[in-house]
Image (tube, helix red, strand yellow):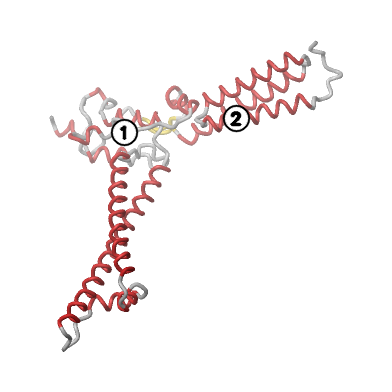
């Protein structure tokens, strides 16, 4: 293993230096900024924090029950006034007080100190728990990497795209070698097709020292959107044109079923719409067709389909 070989990608050592350079390379689209969310550990951390807050809540409930059962004025005062609670935590027995009074003063001081300490623990742990919830919600809202971006990243991470295949082991070793073994994908099929089969159309720049290239993700998404729009428009206008020349009821019913099914298949296959969204789109599509059939245009000068 020579140092020249280690520096084959760019001018930095293979490992964290070269991987960091690769991740930071695409500064416009950030397609290579792929990191694990550690969902399992994040969920466990939230569960641990949640349980810790629950324990503090139980302790607070017990102290509240003790205070509710007490009938002395000092306990009532420190339950209503934070200043009284702070004063009680530092008070000293009065000079000349009998032993019973000193014991009571010490008990009140200790009780106040316990409650103040618990309040601080709750404040810190609850803030930590709530911040963890916010962070988790932020992570879940982030768009996962596309299948294509993830595939390219994995190929680079595994060194399978280096010139002459001079490396066969992963960029990082040890437990870090399995960091990118499993990540998700939310691309729709049109965008996936463009990335996997037609990336050369959108190529904009190459990564020095490798066979990798960057394609314009924005243009790919616009192209995918145009294809989706044209497909939907074609199915709608094609159906309207077809219905314009057909008058037989039984044929019209079959055409409604056929065009609606074709539209549902197109939406389901060409987009990443949810089932509820596919259902809503099909309902709207069928409604437009039914409205057109119910209020046909003037067809007196057209060829009668019957």
Quarter of the image that includes the C terminus: top right
* 30 left or right, relative to 279: left
Quarter occupied by residue 60: bottom left
Crowdedness near tag 2: few (<14), some (14–19) or many (≥20) residues, C-alpha within 10 Å: few
Q: Report the residue at 53% width, 25% height from top.
A: 268
* 299 left or right, relative to 45: right
The x and y percentages for residue 84 are: 31, 78
The reply to whether callout 2 and callout 1 are in contact (CB within 8 Å) is: no
Label placed on residue 208 = 1
Mark 2 → mark 1, Cα distance in angstroms: 37 Å
Q: Residue furthest right?
A: 300
The x and y percentages for residue 118 are: 27, 64
Q: Nearer the viewer, residue 161 or 148?
A: 148
* 45 left or right, relative to 184: left
Q: Nearer the viewer, residue 89 or 150?
A: 89
The x and y percentages for residue 303 are: 82, 13
Q: Residue furthest top?
A: 306
Mark 1 or mark 2, which is nearer the start of the sequence? 1
Q: Nearer the viewer, residue 93 or 124?
A: 93
Q: Report the residue at 73% width, 14% height from top.
A: 250
Q: Report the residue at 15% width, 81% height from top.
A: 99
Quarter of the image that includes the N terminus: top left
Q: Residue furthest left?
A: 1
Q: Report the residue at 20% width, 38% height from top.
A: 13
Query: Compared with residue 285, is residue 73 higher up or lower down, i.e. above or below?
Result: below
Q: Secondary structure at mark 2?
A: helix
Query: According to the image, label 2 marks what residue?
Result: 229
In front of the other: label 2 or label 1? 2
Query: Compared with residue 252, is residue 67 higher up or lower down, i.e. above or below?
Result: below
Q: Nearer the viewer, residue 44 or 145?
A: 44
Quarter occupied by residue 278: top right
């Amino acid at each position: 293993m020579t140092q020249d070989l280690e520096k084959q990608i760019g001018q930095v050592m293979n490992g964290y230096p070269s991987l960091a350079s690769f991740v930071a390379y695409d500064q416009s689209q950030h397609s290579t900024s792929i990191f694990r969310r550690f969902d399992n550990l994040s969920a466990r951390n939230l569960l641990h924090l949640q349980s810790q807050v629950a324990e503090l809540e139980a302790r607070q409930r017990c102290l509240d029950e003790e205070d509710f059962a007490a009938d002395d004025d000092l306990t009532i005062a420190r339950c209503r006034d934070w200043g009284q609670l702070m004063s009680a935590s530092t008070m000293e027995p009065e000079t000349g007080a009998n032993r019973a009074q000193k014991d009571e003063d010490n008990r009140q001081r200790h009780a106040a100190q316990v409650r103040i300490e618990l309040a601080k623990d709750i404040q810190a742990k609850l803030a930590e728990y709530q911040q963890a919830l916010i962070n988790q919600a932020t992570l879940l809202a982030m768009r996962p990497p596309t299948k294509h971006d993830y595939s390219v990243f994995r190929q680079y991470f595994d060194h399978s795209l280096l010139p002459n295949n001079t490396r066969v082991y992963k960029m990082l070793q040890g437990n870090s070698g399995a960091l990118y073994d499993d990540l998700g994908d939310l691309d729709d099929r049109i965008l996936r097709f463009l990335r996997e089969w037609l990336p050369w159309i959108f190529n904009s720049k190459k990564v020095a020292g490798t066979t990798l290239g960057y394609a314009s993700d924005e243009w790919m998404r616009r192209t995918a959107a145009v294809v989706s729009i044209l497909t939907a428009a074609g199915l709608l206008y094609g159906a309207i044109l077809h219905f314009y020349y057909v008058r037989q009821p039984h044929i019209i019913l079959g055409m409604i079923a056929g065009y609606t099914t074709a539209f549902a298949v197109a939406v389901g296959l060409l987009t990443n719409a949810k089932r509820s969204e596919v259902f809503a789109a099909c309902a709207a599509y069928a409604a437009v067709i039914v409205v057109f059939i119910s209020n046909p245009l003037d067809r007196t000068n057209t060829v009668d389909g019957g």
